[in-house]
Image (cartoon, rainbow, N blue to C red):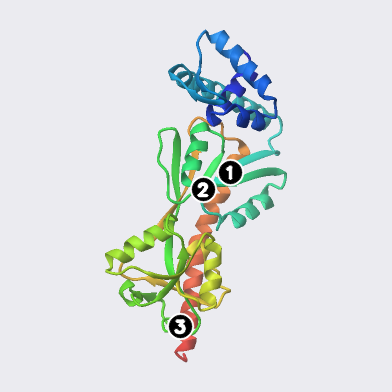
Amino acid sequence: MELLQLQYFLEVARLEHVTEAARALHVTQSSLSKTIQRLEEDLGVPLFDRTGRKLRLNEYGSRFLRRAERALFELEQGKQEISDLSSPEHGTLELAVTNASTLPQILREFRKKHPHIQFHVQMLTTQEMITLLHRGEVDFCLSSPPIQGDDFECEIVFVDPILVAVPKGHRLADRTSVSLAELRDEWFVGVKRGYLTRDLVDSVCQSAGFAPKYVYEGNEPARLSALVEAGIGIGFIPSTAMNPREHIQYLRVEDHELVREIALLWHKSRYISRAALEFRKVVVEYFGMGSNAIKETTIVNKQRSNCHDGK
């Protein structure tokens, strides 16, 4: 049994299609088919049920897949460990995020401290992240909401308050907090359903007796503050995404706990390189400073309120 056979088998098992797997592996279909056939001959059983070029794992294939993934995973961990020992100041971090609002600042801090370490980042859905975590294909994930699983660890690094953002000149702009009941007749800008913040906000508002009226729904959370500043509507924005330089007043929600949890995730069995450990340290330090940033923004808001009041 050859390593190449296992690598080809895993790709075909994931895609369940010879043509697509051959394209992903940059080999010909005939070469791929012959390699899989030799593997089945070595094992003495078929691993797939075939319908044309479409393949589906049978019971033998499903059982063998788990073993093959584990074997290749351990070999990859060995490769990473040797690389870490031979060149600790270099290497590549594999990262995944469900929301990128804090990532640029985190990566900037990490690059200042470790300029020779490269990183590769993927923006993923929660389900895509779970798949990569199970395979052990990423060093760390930053996820909101946190994800629980038998194969990986989950560390809450920040409890992120979700604030109400209103533009300068709004009737609430001289306030530092607001009750949800006072927002019943407002128009909102927000992301589409399916995003954690949107679903959480809608649920909490529903418990307060109303459904938010959205004048804008999009796929880019970073765009919301610009829409609020332009007076299109008010919005619910996590504290980690706020910008104190904008002409926006951020209000705390008084009568409901409105927060999202941000978690750092990693596979229990994945080798954690020195670079990865340093990245984790930067993340924890960054979110520790984030608590101070929220306090500073609160002070700025109060100063603006005093200015409105003529104090």
Q: Is residue 3 visible?
A: no
Marks 1,2: beta carbons within 8 A: yes
Instruction: Give the mark nearest the N terminus, 1 or 3.
Output: 1
Q: Is residue 124 above or below residue 153?
A: below
Seen at 55% across and 50% down, the residue is 283
Q: Say what amino acid the circle numbered 1 marks.
A: Leu
* Spot occupied by residue 23 in the image (x, y as percentages of width and height): 66, 32
Which residue position holds label 2? 142
Image quadrant in which you'd find residue 245: bottom right
From the image, state whether disc 2 or disc 3 is nearer to you: 3
Residue 286, quarter of picture: bottom right
Name the residue that disc number 1 marks. Answer: 95
Q: Is residue 20 above or below residue 176?
A: above
Q: Name the amino acid, label 2.
A: Leu
* Label disc, if present, on residue 170 of the rendered structure: 3
Q: Give the SS element for disc 2.
A: strand
Please give left or right for residue 40 compared with residue 214 in the image.
Answer: right
Amino acid at pointer 3: His
> Is residue 206 depicted above or below 272 in this figure?
below
Q: Nearer the viewer, residue 190 or 250?
A: 190
Dot 3: within a 10 Å radius of its alpha carbon, few (fewer than 14), some, or many (20 or more) residues? some
Q: Residue 161: image x %, image y %?
A: 42, 62
Name the residue at the bottom extreme.
310
Q: Quadrant of residue 215?
A: bottom left
